Amino acid sequence: MFTTQASLILRYGLALVSLTVFPSFSDAQNQREKKVRDDKINVEADGFWIYNDLPKAFEEATWSKKPLVVVFRCIPCEECVKLDDELLKEDPELHALLEKFVRVRVVSTNGLDLSLFQFDYDQSFAVFFLNADSTIYGRYGTRSHRTEWADDVSVSGLKMALLGALKLHADFPANKDSLAAKRGPKPPYPVPEKFPSLMKYSSTLDYEDKVVQSCIHCHMIGDAINEQQRNSAEGMSVNALFPFPHPKSLGLILDPKKYATVSRVIPDSPAAKSGFQTGDVIESLEGQPLLSIADVQWVLHQAGADETSLKAKVVRDNKSLDIDFLLPKGWRERGDISWRASTWELRRLALGGLQLQDADPRPSEIPAGSMALDVKHVGQYSPHDEAKKAGFLPGDLIISFGGRTDLLRETDILAYAMRSQGAGDSIRVDVLREGKKIEFALPRKD
């Protein structure tokens, strides 16, 4: 999967370990192999979880009449490791809840049914709660930063989601209609290995040889979907560039330790203008019952990109009321995609391998509301070295991109470039270097 030590260090997400020290490529591979194999040995020996065998889990759920909890977890990735550790430990309360489920641990997406398991593929930890007939009760697990997850998930929040899933299971099938929209539209391919870029992989992991290299990681599905979009006549859509919008981008801050409960509303935000208040418990959105932030994101993900409104039912002061959640024009682009694993490929295409960050401190000569982005990193190895070949250096300050100075975040530049440029295009980039303005031509090569 990896070709250079640099790509290991610089790429983030479900498949990879964020490290500051990398002794060697072979050492890293050996460590990852051992980690994956040890996880299999330890989990199977314990016997509490079904390991990487979804058909067996569904079969058991059918005869036991229990709901399923399916945990997707990339073993080498260090993100959300505490939450994953808690699942495997003997926390009495969590253990008692999990015993009410058929439990399956999935460590790869080889052969995964993509018509059923649709989630944010940039995650490093994701959970599904399901009925044996494949009805989805809810999702759990989200992220809005490469390494900081405490604002998005928690052990107590997972316990609450488990309790909520058990309640939905107890009410099933009377509530089945309200759960129908938790499944998405038919994907372009039924399983990951049918995507053109993933056809070299098989439907199972190869524990007889190099198991890590045989694994299709979740972020690779996202990469394959993005590649297909880029190769289409329409190019990448806003929906593809900004998948699974986080509610905080709309001013709705949810408590990670509870159900979909509002802990704070940012003033003058879409959430505030819609009428949400601190303490509101969002029971449903567009008719779908909610167990976590991930369920809110699923509804937002399906909402498209145009100005619209979503029907929310909330409980406030023990009273139920309806709220129209107003999504204004451009609402989707409010989100941040810079943390995503899939963004690494977008940086190659749109920025020639540059990684950008907000200027700190901001130069006094750059007016407020105008672009000022520091070049944090310049890719050194092909194919992530187009910016290097063009002459960019770490520390350069980008003040104009394609003649625009209003693209204030790296996210904004990536979205603009991916929607306005094509292969073979060259875009003008103005930078400040040691107080002098320099003009570059940055090529786009797919």
Image (spheres, rainbow, N blue to C red):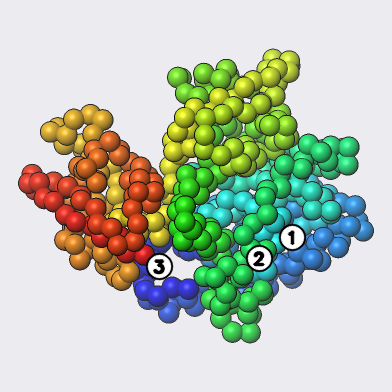
Q: Residues within 10 Å of mark 1 (few under 14, many from 20)?
A: many
- Identified at 19% across, 62% down, the residue is 390
Q: Residues within 10 Å of mark 3 (few under 14, many from 20)?
A: some
Q: Which residue is labeled 3 in the image?
A: 8
Which mark sits nearer the N-terminus, 2 or 3?
3
Which mark sits nearer the N-terminus, 3 or 1?
3
Residue 145 falls left or right of residue 368: right
Mark 2 or mark 1, which is nearer to you?
2
SS assignment at label 1? strand
Mark 2 or mark 3, which is nearer to you?
2
* Residue 191: mark in rendering: 2
Q: Which quadrant: the C terminus?
A: bottom left
The image quarter containing residue 45 is: bottom right
The image quarter containing residue 47 is: bottom right
* Residue 330: mark in rendering: none
Give the image location of residue 48, x and y in percent.
Answer: 77, 61
Eyeballing the image, is 370 above or below 20?
above
| Amino acid on which the number 2 mark rests in the picture | Val
Q: Which residue is labeled 1 in the image?
A: 104
| Residue 282 visible to the viewer | yes
Per the model, the C-alpha gap separating discs 2 and 3 is 26 Å
**CB within 8 Å, label 2 to label 1:** no
SS assignment at label 3? helix
Question: Which residue is more in the foreground, 217 or 390?
Answer: 390
